[in-house]
Image: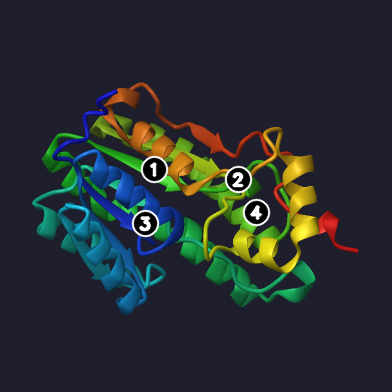
Amino acid sequence: MDLGLTGARALVTGGSAGIGLAIARALAGEGAAVAVCGRDERRLADAVAGLRAGGATAHGLTADVTDPAALGAAVDGAAAALGGLDLLVANAGGSSGGDLLDSTPADWDRTFAVNVLHTAHAVRTAVPHFERAGGGSVLIIASITGWKPGPKSSYAAAKAAEIHLAAALAQELGGRGVRVNALSPGSVLFEGGGWDAFRTAHPERFAAFAREDFPAGRLVTLDEVAAAACFVLSPRASGVNGANIPVDGAQDHPSARRFFP
């Protein structure tokens, strides 16, 4: 299926590794020009080099997404480098602190800033570029934890807010020709990722997690998440707006904590 993404111009925040880079790579494979934003200059340079080696038109922008001014400059910079902007993937995320009793108000502020506020600021800055392009599509990368709550509470609450934000922005921006959706990956296994480290450190517990929580007996992959992202962003999904799309292999629990004594 031709997704109609040839010539599209996309920005992916948190796009230098993991899910963000996989989405950028998949979009490039569909013919889109991509800009990726990240904090680590070396990792960002490596990501851009890899995208270009695959034949993509790619640009990198260094920014801390929790700094609204820096993030706004990155969005505007991506539009300038690509000659406009059609797609935005708000992928940057993470959490600070531990569970509720092991975290501080500053940890919660940071967690909401890197997830929810970064998304809102990025979309706000992107809208004028979308309008000049005749419309746009936004994908917010949330999490299974946002709709199947589990620890850590700050991260779960922030991801739930992202899912709700997508629905609210779809209502606010639909008249401007902008679609907004959320994508909620489950536990994604890839080399160098957290679940890969868990598998190496605790192979028996990892095997039990995969066997008991996933009907297919395996975690989802980066390619599966990226393929879903490309479809939802594309004109082929023009009727999908304000939705939350799980890509979790029907995962039962968002956490493997119960496999630890």
Which residue matches tag 3? 21
Looking at the image, the residue that sits furthest to the left is 83
97 to the left or right of 259 = left
Which residue matches tag 2? 186
What residue is at 53 percent from the left and 66 percent from the top? Answer: 192
Between disc 1 and disc 2, whose residue precedes?
A: 1
Q: CA distance from mark 1 to mark 4?
A: 18 Å
Between disc 3 and disc 2, whose residue precedes?
A: 3
The quadrant in which residue 220 appears is top right
With respect to residue 214, does 122 lie above or below?
A: below
The amino acid at mark 4 is Ala
**Residue 157: x, y in percent?**
64, 54
What residue is at 75 percent from the left and 67 percent from the top? Answer: 100
Q: Secondary structure at mark 1?
A: strand
Q: Secondary structure at mark 2?
A: loop
Q: CA distance from mark 4 to mark 3?
A: 23 Å
Q: CA distance from mark 1 to mark 3?
A: 14 Å
